[in-house]
Every structure is written in C-alpha cells, then in structure tokens.
Image: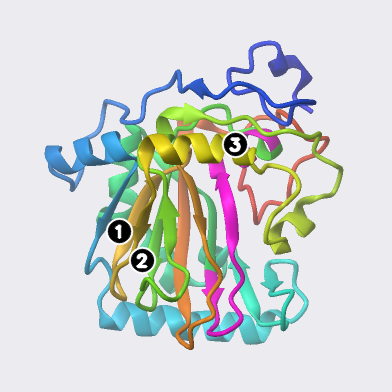
Amino acid sequence: MNSSATLTDRYPTRLPEAGIVMDRPDPVIWPGRDGPWAEDAVEFFGDNGYRSVEGVLDAADLAQVRSEVARLAADLGDDARLIRERSNGDVRSLFSVHTMSESIAAIIDRDEIAGVARQLLGDDVYVHQSRVNLKPGFAGGPFYWHSDFETWHAEDGMPTPRAVSVSMALTPNTPFNGPLMILPGSHRRFVPCVGETPGDYHRESLTSYRPPFGTPEESDIATLAEEYGITQVTGGAGSALYFDCNCLHASAGNISPFPRSNLFVVFNAVSNALEEPFAAQSRRPEYLAAR
C-alpha cells in the first residue's frame, strides 16, 4: 500500500462505501510532442477519449502476429502469462507478448502506434502492458464495465491517467462478435470503486467476467451512460482503436461463430512511472505492470 502517497492521492478508490464521481484534474492531451496525427484527429481524441483508424496493420503484419500468437499459445502451457476461458479452457488472453516476440515488439514500436502515444502524452513512453485478447466463436467471455486507469492506479501505483491504449484488430471486430463499447467523454470523469483489494487477487480478476473489485457501481455506469451514450467500436482486420486509459469501456461475450482477436498495448509516459500500489497490499507481476 502506498501509504505515504495516500495523503496526496487525487484518485482515491477501493473505498469502504460508494464515492462521488469526480472531474478528472489532469489533462487528456499533454503538450510537448509532435506526431503523426493531424490537429483535428488529436482534438477528436481529446473530446471523445478514443479514435479508430483503419489499415494500421497490413495483411503481412496480421499473418505475422497471428503466427506468433499461435506459437506462444502452444509453447506457454501453464505459464502465468496465459489466461484461459472459464467456460471451455480456450485461451482468453496472452500477456507480455512484446517481450516474447521480436516481430510484435517491432510493430508496437512504429510511429503510427508508439509515435501516436508520444504525441498524445507529450513525453517518451514505455510499454506498461501488452497482451492479445482472444474471443473464440461461441465461447468468448465478456469483459465488464471498468476504467483501466482505476485498476492501474489502485493495484499498480500509476500516479495519473497519463497513459494510452492501442487495440489492433487481428480479425474483424463486428457488431456480432463482442466488440468494445465505450462511453465517449467518460475519460474526463473518475469513477471510484467500492471494496478493499484482497491480497494476491490479480489471477482471479483476469478470469472473472465481472470482478468483485475494481468494478464501478451500476448506478454510476447508468448515470454516465445517460450523459454520454454508448459507442460500439467496430473495424476491419488491421484497424486500430486508440483510447484514453480512463475511458469506461466493456465488451459483451461472443456467441457468434466468428472469433474476435485483438493485439493490445498500453503506453505509459516515462514521467508517470509506477509507484507503490495506491489501494492494494502488494505489486502485481511484471507481465501485468512493467516497471
């Protein structure tokens, strides 16, 4: 527990009772860096908390990443970095993929990916977390409503929401196979969650469809959905969704026959390096929160 920082914690969460949804005190777009996006694209991201771009990965990239994912899934066995679906044991997520695949690391390092993160965050960046999320046909489980920053702040010690995620579609993300849903504009609010984080809880949270901790109150989700609406983000294979780490988002399960797979990477500003957890007893593993 980051007890010394708790006195100045501007994002208190994991509270004994429901807290008040607060306005975000930090910027969304941080000044100081140029990058590949035009000003209107940066403004759209700042206003909405996300932006989707087609054709970021080409056919050769997609084939390479899919091959690497298949290799890693076969090689890892019972490795902690491999998470399986509770329903049927299929692979749900593979973590820290950029450390196990040079070709995936090279893709992540491109200007249209890492360079966008530097532009939005106004700083040099490093990979806080990478993973591949797989939603197999008929069996892919949902991911419940949450803010990634709330988890990373509480359980990893990320001081401020100066991080951006990029989700690259390895298969088409359609309305039928559990695409991401975002509350556009919710990135400008911080929603505290109820409940003290139990020790050594991270493994359960990665396999739970609705984790008992780090999940906003339904009343808060409903209020913000009324205010901002819900956007379902779809795109072709090779498209990329860039979104602010504090966006409230979720995805439904996949009962269609068509799988949905995404390469996901989180860039954190170097100046926003992790401290001790703000609302947990110990650090999570390096594959979840790189230090």
Question: What span is colored magenta in the figure?
Answer: 133-154
Q: Which residue is mark 2?
A: 107
> What is the CA distance from the residue labelled 2 to the residue labelled 3?
40 Å
Rendered residue at 47%/74% (across/down): 261
Classify residue 55 by image quadrant.
bottom left
On screen, residue 224 versus residue 277, left or right, reads left
Which of discs 1 and 3 lies nearer the camera? The answer is 3
- Mark 1 residue crowding within 10 angstroms, few (<14) / some (14–19) / many (20+): few
Q: Which residue is mark 1?
A: 110
* Image coords of residue 207 (percent x, y): 72, 64
Q: Which residue is mark 3?
A: 219
Rendered residue at 69%/55% (across/down): 210
Q: Is residue 140 magenta?
A: yes
Classify residue 42 by image quadrant.
top left
236 above or below 181? below
Q: Amino acid at mark 1?
A: Arg
Q: Amino acid at mark 3?
A: Ser
- Mark 2 residue crowding within 10 angstroms, few (<14) / some (14–19) / many (20+): some
* Image coords of residue 281 (percent x, y): 83, 35
Mark 3 secondary-structure assignment:
helix
Q: Nearer the viewer, residue 1 or 125?
A: 1
User: Contact, CB < 8 Å: mark 1 with mark 3?
Assistant: no
Q: Is residue 142 magenta?
A: yes
Which of discs 2 and 3 lies nearer the camera? The answer is 3
